[in-house]
Image (tube, rainbow, N blue to C red):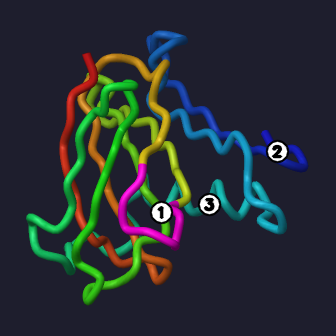
Amino acid sequence: GVSSRSAFIRVAFPGDDPNNLTLDLNVSITPEGVEPITELQGVFDAWNQSTETSEVGKSNELQVYLDSAGRLAFSYSGVESGVPEQLLLTSMLGQEGAYNVSRFWVDQAGLSGWVDIRGFSPGTYIVRLVSKSGKLLGTRKMMIH
């Protein structure tokens, strides 16, 4: 589905739990001037691993943790590898091939920040930091309890 400010795609196989679909991608709001369908394509590409998947940064350049407010906090120190533009949060929903990707824009003014993940379902998540050119700058795995 597409509207003027959001877009989504949901794919279910027979037998999928309605709350745990094989594919559930959602772009709830886009920055001014960005078409929701274009943003959804980017989220789909990230889910489909069609962007570059080898990290250009060193493994210790991206740090992620839950702060005291329950938000996902991150810091990145690998500026020479590229400037972060997006943080992708992929949930591993328990079924093989079942993922949900959320995309957050990173503030270009700093190399650290947070995204509000309160309300996200408990589980295992893959955190990826991506540059404007699509380079994967860092990857971390985290658990939400």
Q: Amino acid at mark 1?
A: Gln
Q: Nearer the viewer, mark 1 or mark 2?
A: 1
Q: CA distance from mark 2 to mark 3?
A: 12 Å
Mark 2, residue position: 2
Does residue 62 lie above or below 95 as drawn?
below
Q: CA distance from mark 1 to mark 3?
A: 14 Å
In this view, the residue in front, 48 or 87, is: 87
Q: Main secondary structure of the magenta part?
A: loop
Q: Residue at x 23, y 78 (%)?
A: 78
Q: Is 89 placed left or right of 39 in the picture?
A: left
Q: Amino acid at mark 3?
A: Gln
Q: Is residue 41 magenta?
A: no
In the rendered image, which quarter is residue 79 located in?
bottom left
In this view, the residue in front, 7 or 22, is: 7
Horizontal and vertical percent for residue 140? 19, 50
Does residue 61 lie above or below 113 as drawn?
below
| Residue neighbourhood size for the residue with mark 1, other residues' Cα within 10 Å, grouped as few (<14), some (14–19), many (≥20) | some
Quarter of the N terminus within the rendering: top right
Going from N to C along the chain, the mark reached first, 2 or 3, is: 2
Boundaries of the magenta span: 106-113
Mark 1, residue position: 86
Q: Residue at x 22, y 58 (%)?
A: 139
Mark 3, residue position: 41
Horizontal and vertical percent for residue 74? 31, 52
